[in-house]
Amino acid sequence: MPNVMGVLRAEIRRLARKETRQEIAALRKHVNSMRRRVAESRRRIRELETRTKQAGKRGAGAPAAADEDSGKQVRFSPAWVKRHRSKLGMSRRIYAKLLSVSPQTIMGWESGRTRPRRSALKTWREIRGKGVRELKALVTGGARKKRRGAGAKKAGRKLRVLARRVARGAAARRATVRRGTAGRTRGKVARRARGKAVRRRASRPRAKKK
């Protein structure tokens, strides 16, 4: 009987270790995949930063800078705004993101009800000096970065939840093994105590009948 219980305990431990190794292997694969995605996102971010710096240098040397030095306002026309947005094929919402303003502001510029401030005019002049592909790359790159950031956070939460489940499962298996071992030990002690009591009763001298 003790040999059978020992074999059973060893088999339970082996199965628990096997299941734990499988879950840890799956977690490692997922973590490696997320690391590769993060590395790819960082590489693309560096490329976008490099392109932005280069575009800023090109925009800094534009001839329109002489207008600000002489105190004159940058030339502006509502039709130019609408024509430039149509050329890019962008909606007011996306075009407003490039200028860091609201879509309602773009609508006011195009209708002529409002006029941009000096900082907005400077930004608008800079994006007019950039190409269509470059501006679209900036817009799509920012959206992808946000989606990847959200996906990485979601995957991180899933990893933490899965790790907690694995830890709870391993703790439950260890507790089950301990309870089984304790129950078997108590049973052995009880059987030994009963055996001793029987042997003591059997060893007592019996009273002779008169």
Image: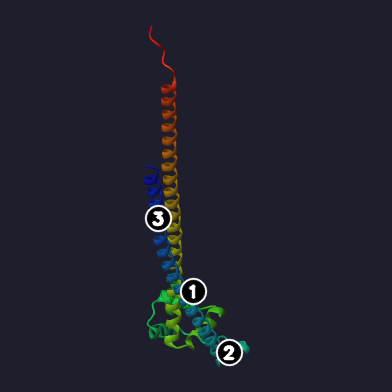
Q: Amino acid at mark 2?
A: Ala
Q: Which mark is residue 101?
A: 1
Identify the residue shown where x is 48% and y is 75%. 39
Can I make out residue 113 in this image? no
The quarter holding residue 158 reads: bottom left
- Asked whether the residues under the numbered discs 3 and 2 touch, taking CB atoms below 8 Å apart as contact, a structural biologist would say no
Q: Position of residue 102 (x, y in %)?
A: 46, 72
Q: Which residue is mark 3?
A: 14
- Give the structural element (helix, strand or loop) at label 2: helix
- Asked whether the residues under the numbered discs 1 and 3 touch, taking CB atoms below 8 Å apart as contact, a structural biologist would say no
Identify the residue shown where x is 42% and y is 67%. 30
- Give the structural element (helix, strand or loop) at label 1: loop
Q: Position of residue 78 (x, y in %)?
A: 44, 82
Q: Position of residue 155 (x, y in %)?
A: 43, 64
Name the residue furthest bottom. 63
Callout 2: few (<14), some (14-19), or many (20+) C-alpha neighbours within 10 Å? some
The answer for how far apart the CA atoms under marks 1 and 3 are is: 63 Å
Front residue of 50 and 205? 205
Front residue of 40 and 7? 7
Q: Amino acid at mark 1?
A: Val
Q: Amino acid at mark 3?
A: Arg
